[in-house]
Amino acid sequence: MKIIVLLCSLLLVTAQASDLAKEKRWADQTVDAIFDGEVVWLKAGNLKFLSIYTEAENESDKAIIVVHGTGIHPDWDQVVKPVRVRMTTHGWNTLSIQMPILNNEATYEDYLPLFSEVAPRIKAAEAYLKEKGMKTIVIVAHSQGAAMSSYYLSQNKHNISAFVAIGMPSRQTNASYDSTLALQSINIPVYDIYGSKDLPTVLNTTAERKAAGKHNARYSQKEISGAEHFFDGKEDILIETIQQWLNQL
């Protein structure tokens, strides 16, 4: 019943779409500045969107889809770039993808109509990695990207082997989407990472997220001491935490 309510809530929100002009501006600023990895233009229906593929240092058939948070791009210096570049030293190819975005003034709730645009983008990323021979594909997502990814994993058939959610918010002010509802329907391994100084929407719902993952023996939660939402100065421990957990799969 909760999942039905979640779906109805998303469908009732006024229609809105990603700000493609802003996506283009981000791409124009980002493409020429990429030194690690190669630009790949994926297609979601008729839409081309930016992604960055970075090969593992040693030959590997494992890959991470990196999913960024609110309003930014797939080479963002905080969380996103450290994951997409540094996980390649631990045997993981990475594909960081541009997610739907809105203007800078948009609220979390303004993004809810864009959740319908998530599946085509992640599916395109999955297909690209499968074509490259990847046998293990995981999602590592930050902030709203984690919420979007949890929604995707709970509502779609997929080839994702595990999900790392970093600073995943839950139960927003209008309660029309709660990522804990999605966690109740995810059965693959889930690692719920957050900082001890994270945002209230993350910290105030840690117990609820843990309860939502109780059905899943492969759900675990990890607090990184002293880290805030963007893990500034805590990148080393964040990468080490992700790498150690993925190595246990």
Image (cartoon, rainbow, N blue to C red):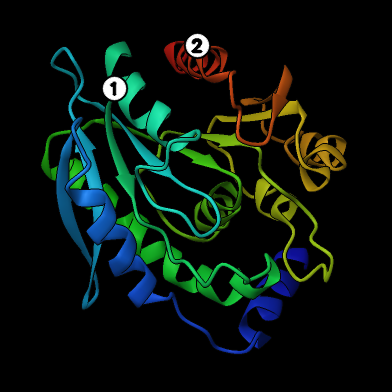
> For the residue carrying disc 2, how many other residues have a C-alpha within 10 Å: few (<14), some (14-19), or many (20+)?
some
> For the residue carrying disc 1, how many other residues have a C-alpha within 10 Å: few (<14), some (14-19), or many (20+)?
many
Tell me the element at label 1: loop
Q: Nearer the viewer, residue 116 or 32?
A: 32
In which quarter of the view is residue 54 placed?
top left
Q: Which residue is mark 1?
A: 92
Q: Nearer the viewer, residue 159 or 97?
A: 97
In which quarter of the view is residue 178 placed?
bottom right
Tell me the element at label 2: helix
Disc sitting over residue 169 in the figure: none
Q: Which residue is mark 2?
A: 240
Whether residue 124 is visible, yes or no, is: no
In which quarter of the view is residue 64 placed?
top left
Identify the residue shown where x is 75% and y is 35%: 198
Say if 195 sits above or below 6 in the image. Answer: above
Identify the residue shown where x is 70% and y is 65%: 3
Residue 201 location in percent, x, y?
Answer: 80, 48
Identify the residue shown where x is 84% and y is 65%: 173
Say if 154 sits above or below 90 in the image. Answer: below
Whether residue 117 is visible, yes or no, is: yes
Q: Are marks 2 and 1 in contact (CB under 8 Å)?
A: no
Label 2 sits on what residue type? Glu
Which image quadrant: the N terminus? bottom right
Left or right placement of residue 142 versus residue 89 in this view: right
Left or right placement of residue 176 versus residue 56 in this view: right
First reached walking from the N terminus: tag 2 or tag 1: 1
